[in-house]
Amino acid sequence: MRPADLDAIDRKILIQVQADGRISVADLADHVGLSPSACHRRLKRLEDEGVIEGYVALVSPAALGRGTSVFVQITLDRQQDQDLRAFEAKVMECPEVMECYLMAGDADFMLRVVVADGSDYERLHTQTLTRLPGVARVRSSFTLRTVAKRTTVPMR
């Protein structure tokens, strides 16, 4: 589905479910001005077409003892397809990796990892990150505090 295929009602639905993924279809229908059955059909279409990728609970990493985020730039020694795929497959096995992006620029990959503290990151760095396939360099930046963290995509 392209953005142009979304009408005003679709956008209202997306705004509501981004704010409250547990909203009932009846309440959602009231918010967007549809009958529950029409709202359910639209919601199902948005799910089926991949506009809505899923529903999750946002869990506090700090509440689980993983309150430190570290951004990690990884440079590989080679950037051929098989090298990138090997790294990507292995990095996905690391539960501390919350996000992984293939980058253009100085580093090949940017990771966001969650750890308990500096000692926990040292363990992750020495036992996992530096042992991933093809890693030539690891550069880490610790967050001091989160200024903005959004889970909603703008509806413009």
Image (cartoon, helix red, strand yellow):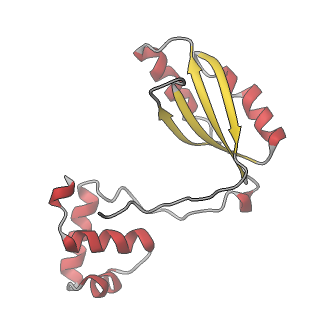
Relative to 147, residue 127 above or below = above
In front of the other: 107 or 126:
107
Q: Quadrant of residue 98?
A: top right
Q: Residue 114 placed where, x, y %?
A: 67, 46
Q: Residue 33 placed where, x, y %?
A: 23, 86
Q: Quadrant of residue 153?
A: bottom left
Residue 101 visible? The answer is yes
Is residue 51 left or right of 151 when viewed as pictured?
Answer: left
Is residue 16 left or right of 135 when viewed as pictured?
Answer: left
**Residue visible at 44% across and 72% down in the picture:** 19
Q: Residue 32 placed where, x, y %?
A: 26, 82
**Residue visible at 46% across and 15% down in the picture:** 79
Where, quadrant-wise, is the C terminus in this rendering? bottom left
Residue 41 visible? The answer is no
**Residue visible at 53% across and 23% down in the picture:** 106
Q: Quadrant of residue 23?
A: bottom left
Q: Residue 10 placed where, x, y %?
A: 23, 69
**Residue visible at 38% across and 71% down in the picture:** 17
In front of the other: 54 or 129:
129
Relative to 3, residue 35 above or below = below
Relative to 55, residue 102 above or below = above
Q: How many marks?
A: 0
Relative to 14, residue 97 above or below = above
